[in-house]
Amino acid sequence: MARSDAQARSKRKNGSSPIFLPIRRDENGRIIKNPPSQIRSAILGELDRRQMTRYQLWKAAYEICPTLTQSAVYEFLRGFRQLGLEYIESLLAALKLRVVTMR
């Protein structure tokens, strides 16, 4: 299987064996990014404000959640991957950010 034909792996909701979903690509073969995320934008903005690297963010978040992989953080911040709540919370906690409701 060629690298361009690779498939993304996703766990089922009940935690059983993984299922494989095809990677979405446009007509030119480029991977389609997920739509902009307010949480992703807030994290990237805070990294920029603090002049903090993505590696430093992963290291801090890894202390909170040891199952968080470096590649998951990089792919999430580039818009190629979605993360579960536990991982998002560890990224927010590492930056001491919190979610508030808008009124």
Image (cartoon, helix red, strand yellow):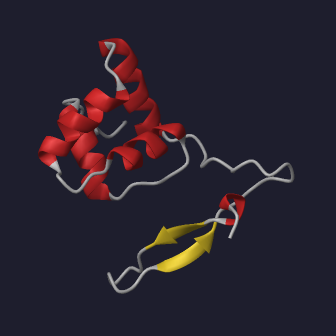
Residue at 27% across, 52% down: 68
At 31% from the left edge and 50% from the top edge, which residue is drawn? Answer: 69
- How many numbered discs? 0
Residue 21 can be seen in this image? yes
Residue 31, image x, y percentages: 69, 50
Quadrant of the image occupied by residue 91:
top left
Camera sees residue 98: no
- Residue 52 percent coordinates (x, y): 31, 19
Residue that protrudes farthest toward the left in the picture: 63
For image coordinates 40% across by 47% down, the residue present is 71
Judged left or right of residue 96, residue 78 is right
Residue 33 % position (x, y): 63, 47
**In this picture, residue 8 sits left or right of residue 2:** left
Of residues 57 and 35, the one nearer the viewer is: 57
Say which residue appears at 39% left-offset and 54% top-offset. Answer: 83
Looking at the picture, how far across and down is residue 96, in whole percent? Answer: 18, 30
The C terminus: image quadrant: top left
- Quarter of the figure with residue 8: bottom right
Q: Is residue 46 left or right of residue 25?
A: left
Quadrant housing the N terminus = bottom right
- Judged from this view, the residue extending furthest toward the front is 1
**Depicted 57 relative to depicted 31: above or below:** above
